Structures are given as structure tokens and as C-alpha cells.
Amino acid sequence: MNQKIPFVLLYLCSFAISAQSLSYVDQAVLFSTESNFGTGRYVGMSGAFGALGNDMSAVDINPAGLAVYNRGEFSTTFTYRDTNIKSSFYGNDINNQDDYFRFSQIGGLNSWDSFGNPDIYKFAFGFNYSVVNHYNNNYVVQGNSGIPEYPDDPDFNFDDDPNNDINYINVDDQYFYNYTSGINDKFNFSFATLYKEIVYLGASMAFHHINFYQNTVFEESSNDGEGNTMDVRNVEYLSTYASGFNFGLGIIVTPAEGLRLGASYQSPIWYNLSERFERRTTYLFNGEVDPDPDYPLPNYYDYKITTPGKFTGSIAYVFGQHGLLSLDYIYQDYKKTKLSPSSNFIDENQDLSTGLRSTNSFKIGTEWKFNMISLRGGYRIIQSPYRDSSTEYDNKGYSLGLGIKFSRRFGLDFAYDNSSYQDEYRFLTAAGTDPAQLEFTNNRFTSSLVFSF
């Protein structure tokens, strides 16, 4: 049986829904979004690499960039993230802060000069493992809306006789805890060639994997005004596993010295998903545990998601050996996000079609070289996919980077990335209640080892 949960706002790693756990609509949007993971050089320039290449993470945007390499390369990356989530609920603010560390990228390529065809100058083949999104987060919300989520005693209000109803209309406290973990990662295989020293062409195929877990706890204390109290604890567990596939095509053109133009297309990702959902609700009446708790059997369900494709247009100018400027424009039509089988998701697909929009996002980056040192910086605006969301819900971030080339064969890259946005989470379904307001601030530190051969 499907979970039927109406659609409202969600963005990235926070979930605004009208029940505690993610709905299928929420998952479709979450699994369609990406974060700014990659090599230290890539992160330091905020991912503005569509017309540049010469970086393993750049291949995930435009596979034609693989042919920019003149030699083989291997890189591996680690990422540390510090996250602060400020929750506000009916005048009560709570700061939630945690940090996370993980291995986030490893890849390599080899490049060969072409022999035989005078128009084809180079072949390159590469493999890259990378994290797309990291779902580890947790926060607490606490306050009092004054409107009960559980107004009735389920042991007494079971018939049509209003004379025996017990209504717990006075709320004493409401508490919500949200914990998520997991990863969205992929293995990318890319091929590229250089034609007549002007046109770089590339293609890729990627195999995606998702492991997502969510645990939520909602607690409410209330009374009926006549000395009777009810404490409710509702716990939900959601586990989702997925595998998917997509392909990419790209081109980079160098029409004049220093100038590079890029265009690429990343196809939709076709996901097959399996989920396990479980809910447990317990009651305390006047401090005594209800002997008949509500523990339904776990729900198992298989379904599919098709994410929106992505178009990237890029322009860059390279100032010889001194530095570069790069700009990427990204277009995605989130209205094309689909759940299937379609007969089981008629309402959800309608919500996706009417509630989402086409997005226009931008990334800009720069790099300047001073002998063995490279200094980098970048800025990005990733537009929210929700039709009615304001600019506060856009993900905005800046980055700084440092590269050290110790020799022709070995280098280290470091990057600092800061991003922030606002969100809301509607964990109460009672009419007239407000959602919790959330403010996310992420500080991420990335380091890469790069070996050339």
C-alpha cells in the first residue's frame, strides 16, 4: 500500500511534508537534487567547469572535458562537513549542530595521442566514483502550537456516542525529532576525443546508488481540562534503497585563443526503488501506558522515479598559464519528475507537475596561478524547484580554494565551501498549525590528492 501524504515544500536535505516521514513526492524531489561534492579544485571554484575539463569531477558535468587532459591522472578526495540547523517553532528557537566526515571521490583517466586519422588528435577514457548527495542530518523542534495533533482518546472515542468522548484539547508541549542518514553516489565511465584541435567531444554513462534512512519521533502532551492527561509518542522509520542509470553527452569548442564554449546534456536518471516503512504509536493516560499500542505491520513497496534531465551551457576564458574565469548556466525542468507505475501515483504526479517549475541556476569560478600555488574562488545560486518558493529557499554558496603543485606528478588541493538556505517542515497535520521554520548553514572542507603520470 502506498503512503498517501499531500505535497508541500521540500528542499535538499530538509523535508517539508504534512506527516512525519517523507512522502513519495518528497523522495522524488530529494533524489533529483545534487550537492557541490567533488575534487578540491572543483569545489574551490563552485563547480563552474562545464567548458574547462581537466578535472575528474568536471567530467560529471561535461564528458568532453576528459580530452583536455594531455596525460593520465588519478585523484582521491575526502570531505568534512559542519552543519548548523536552527529550528523555530511558535517562538522557541533551537540550534542543532553536527559534523560529518567521509570519503567522497576517487577516479582516474588515461589519454592517448591518436594515430592513423589526421583529424582525430586524442582519445581519453576515465572512471570516477563520486558522492552526489550526503543525507546525514538531524535536528529537534520543540514548542506549543496550542492545537492538538491527537485530540481524542482512541480507547474511548470509538463509537457514535458523544457522551463518552474524552477530548484532550489543551496542549502542554509538542516535540519533534528528525534524523536522516545515507548517501546518493555514482560510478561514471567517460570517453572523449579531440577533433582537429578545436572540438572536444565526449560521452558518459553513470550507475547510481541510493541508500536513505529516516527516523522521526513526535511527542505530544495534552489534557482535557478536567484532570485527565494523555501523552502520545509516534515513531516512524523509513528505509529506501535505489539503483539507477543515466548517460551524458558533451562538447567543448575553442573558437579563439583562450576562449572556450561548452554545452552538455545529462539524461534523466531512471531509478528503481524499494522501501520499508514502519510506524509505532504509544499512549500514556494519566501516566499509565496503554496496554494496546498501535503497531501496524511494516509496509514494503517497490516503485520507480524518473528525474529531470539537465542542460548546461558554459563559457570560460583561459589567460594562458596565469589564470581563468568560468561561468556555467544550468537548466532543469523539474515538472518532468515522474513516479511510476503511473496508475499508482496519479495524485503524486499531478502534484509534481503543478507544484514544481523549471529552474535556472548559475555557477561562476576563477583560478589564478603563482608558480606552484593556485588560488581559487567561486559563487553559485541553485534555484529552488518549487513553483511558489521565494529566493530565500534558493541554495546560495561561495567557495575558496588552494592548490599546491609539489612536482609535475603530485599535488594537493584544498577547498572551503559555505552554503545557506531557509526551509520549513510541516510535521503537524492539524488545521491551523504552522510549520517549523528551519535555517541551514553548511561549512564544508575538502581535500584532494592528485597524481599525474
Image (spheres, rainbow, N blue to C red):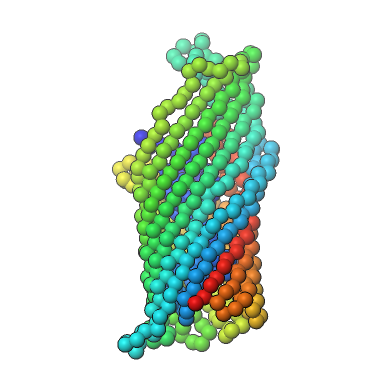
Q: Residue at x 43, y 36 (%)?
A: 277
Tell me the quarter of the image containing the N terminus. Answer: top left
User: Is any part of residue 175 visible from this angle?
Assistant: yes
> For the point 54% across and 21% down, which residue is it?
283
Q: Position of residue 24 (x, y in %)?
A: 42, 43
Picture coordinates of residue 224 (x, y %)? 61, 17
Residue lying at 53% horizontally and 72% vertically, measured from the top left: 451
For residue 421, say whether it is visible: no
Q: How many marks?
A: 0
Compared to residue 84, the image places residue 222 above or below, namely: above
Tell me the quarter of the picture where residue 432 sits: top right
Residue 334 location in percent, x, y? 43, 55
Closest to the observer, 308 or 54: 54
Which residue is at a point 62% across and 60% down the rendered structure image? 445
Is residue 27 positioned above or below 103 on the image?
above
**Residue 97: percent from left, percent from top:** 66, 46
